[in-house]
Image (cartoon, helix red, strand yellow):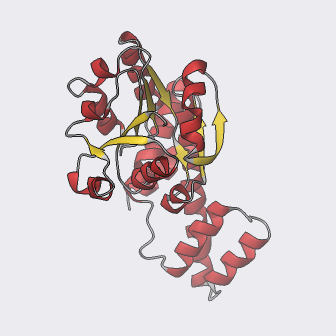
């Protein structure tokens, strides 16, 4: 029997990921801030934790995928979490957060003898359900080797970006920034097409079958063409482009386009 995994965060991404771990034969103890989201697991006999630390197995692996930096820090700093994870325990953080937050939390884990890995994912909920996620991974080599079977149950590809915690978050934020910049470009192109009496759906089909046959243009292009008034990157776009530009500025890297895209998204 495979080891018990703690799983924290059962939102649109976390729920299908946790279900895939069950299918792969892992025993789970799950926690979610909104208790109603644990019901699909309770009916399968999965143990439901009353607080984050109750999902932790001493010296084991706990996976978290929560909304933002503040939510992740709330989990780690909650009563008993780090103490219970203890010596050689691994916190596999799959949230999209700032590299600075990951580095800070990694230091906290190290003081308690445990490991923190950042492993954010690329892919929407349907890809999570189909075990087709692309996962970036950073942190100590021994800990990465131990969690690799867990990650293989969640996605189709794993990209190891080194032992420096925070690096995987940089790659994730970079991908998200490119995605939101691409969406903004597609929005402007299709607005011009519509005002010029050109079918925007036809423009998307032509561009994504020739110059840009890539999922991000196909995905956003279709949404914008069919419902331009209601398309929005939402708070995630503002959050992630903001985190990208903060990381760039902290590293001394110029990011004028990120500044512009963030300002545009913040005005929506």
Measuring from the top left, give residue 119's x and y in whole percent.
Answer: 52, 36
Measuring from the top left, give residue 167's x and y in whole percent.
Answer: 57, 29
Up the image or down, 148 lies above or below 173; here it is: above
Up the image or down, 98 lies above or below 226; here it is: above
Do we see residue 254 in this rendering?
Answer: no
Q: Quadrant of residue 8?
A: top left
Do we see residue 65 in this rendering?
Answer: yes
Measuring from the top left, give residue 253's x and y in whole percent.
Answer: 59, 30
What residue is at 38 percent from the left and 23 percent from the top? 105
Question: Residue 55 versus residue 248: which sits nearer the camera?
Answer: 55
- Residue furthest out toward the right: 210
- Residue furthest out toward the bottom: 197
Total of numbered circles in the picture?
Answer: 0
Question: Residue 211 versus residue 121: which sits nearer the camera?
Answer: 121
Measuring from the top left, give residue 185's x and y in whole percent.
Answer: 60, 62
Left or right of 100 in this view: 191:
right
Question: Residue 193 versus residue 4: which sits nearer the camera?
Answer: 4
What residue is at 45 percent from the left and 55 percent from the top? 16
What residue is at 52 percent from the left and 62 percent from the top? 126
Q: Quadrant of residue 40?
A: bottom left
Image quarter hosting the C terminus: bottom left
């Amino acid at each position: 029997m495979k080891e018990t995994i703690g799983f924290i965060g059962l939102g649109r991404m976390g729920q299908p990921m946790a279900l895939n771990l069950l299918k792969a034969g892992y025993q789970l103890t799950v926690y979610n801030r909104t208790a109603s989201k644990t019901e699909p697991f309770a009916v399968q006999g999965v143990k439901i934790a009353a607080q984050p630390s109750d999902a932790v197995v001493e010296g084991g692996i706990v996976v978290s995928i929560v909304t933002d930096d503040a939510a992740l820090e709330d989990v780690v700093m909650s009563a008993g979490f780090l103490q219970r994870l203890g010596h050689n325990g691994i916190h596999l953080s799959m949230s999209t957060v700032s590299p600075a937050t990951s580095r800070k939390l990694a230091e906290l884990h190290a003081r308690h003898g445990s490991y923190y890995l950042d492993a954010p994912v690329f892919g929407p909920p349907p890809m999570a359900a189909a075990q087709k996620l692309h996962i970036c991974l950073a942190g100590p080599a021994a800990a990465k080797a131990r969690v690799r079977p867990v990650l293989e149950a969640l996605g189709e590809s794993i990209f190891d970006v080194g032992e420096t915690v925070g690096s995987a978050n940089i790659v994730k934020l970079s991908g998200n920034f490119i995605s939101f910049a691409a969406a903004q470009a597609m929005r402007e192109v299709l607005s011009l097409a519509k005002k010029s009496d050109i079918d925007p759906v036809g423009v998307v089909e032509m561009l994504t079958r020739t110059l840009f046959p890539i999922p991000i243009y196909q995905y956003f292009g279709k949404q914008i063409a069919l419902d331009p008034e209601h398309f929005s990157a939402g708070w995630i776009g503002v959050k992630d482009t903001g985190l990208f530009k903060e990381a760039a500025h902290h590293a001394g890297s110029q990011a004028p386009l990120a500044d512009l895209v963030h300002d545009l998204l913040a005005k929506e």
